[in-house]
């Protein structure tokens, strides 16, 4: 038994199976892109969570300000009513 592994044999093999090599390379590229996409999704999800927390804080603050404004309006109406009498 003799070994058929020669530089020309390897080149013939590569030449005849270029589509397989391209397919495997494409698969590796696709998997790498998907992995990068997962990392990007995690980063975006974290940013959304931070923004949701900030929005909740702002909504709470706005609600408290609205209550204070309503109290001031009520006080002004009472003063206005007292002045008119």
Image: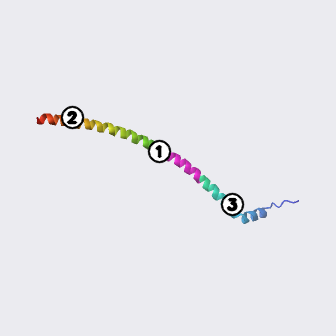
User: Which residue matches tag 2?
Assistant: 75
Q: Is 32 or 48 nearer to us in this picture?
A: 48
* Residue drawn at x 25%, y 35% as measured from the top left: 71
User: Which residue matches tag 1?
Assistant: 47
Describe the element under mark 3 as helix, strand or loop. Answer: helix
Q: Which region is colored magenta?
A: 33-46
Q: Of callouts 3 and 1, which one flags the residue occurring earlier in the amino acid sequence?
A: 3
User: How far apart are labels 3 and 1 at the CA level?
Assistant: 39 Å
User: Which residue matches tag 3?
Assistant: 21
User: How far apart are labels 2 and 3 at the CA level?
Assistant: 81 Å
Q: Position of residue 47 (x, y in %)?
A: 47, 44
Secondary structure mostly seen in the magenta stretch:
helix
Query: Residue 2 is drawn in which quadrant?
Result: bottom right
> In the figure, is residue 77 to the left or right of 51?
left
Q: Is residue 44 magenta?
A: yes
Q: Position of residue 84 (x, y in %)?
A: 11, 36
Quarter that holds the C terminus: top left
The circle drawn on residue 27 is none
Q: Nearer the viewer, mark 1 or mark 2?
A: 2
Query: Residue 23 is drawn in which quadrant?
Result: bottom right
> In the figure, is residue 13 to the left or right of 63?
right
User: How far apart are labels 1 and 2 at the CA level?
Assistant: 42 Å
Q: Position of residue 64 (x, y in %)?
A: 32, 36
Q: Is residue 9 above or below residue 69?
A: below
Bin the neighbour count of mark 3 within 10 Å (Cα to Cα): few under 14, some 14-19, many 20 and up.
few
Q: Is residue 64 magenta?
A: no
Describe the element under mark 1 as helix, strand or loop. Answer: helix
Q: Of callouts 1 and 2, which one flags the residue occurring earlier in the amino acid sequence?
A: 1
Q: Is 43 or 82 nearer to us in this picture?
A: 82
């Amino acid at each position: 038994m003799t070994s058929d592994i020669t530089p020309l044999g390897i080149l013939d093999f590569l030449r005849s199976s270029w589509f397989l090599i391209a397919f495997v390379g494409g698969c590796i590229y696709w998997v790498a892109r998907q992995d990068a996409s997962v990392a990007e999704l995690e980063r975006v999800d974290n940013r959304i969570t931070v923004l949701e927390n900030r929005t909740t804080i702002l909504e709470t603050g706005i609600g408290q300000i609205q209550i204070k404004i309503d109290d001031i309006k009520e006080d002004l109406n009472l003063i206005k009513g007292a002045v008119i009498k």
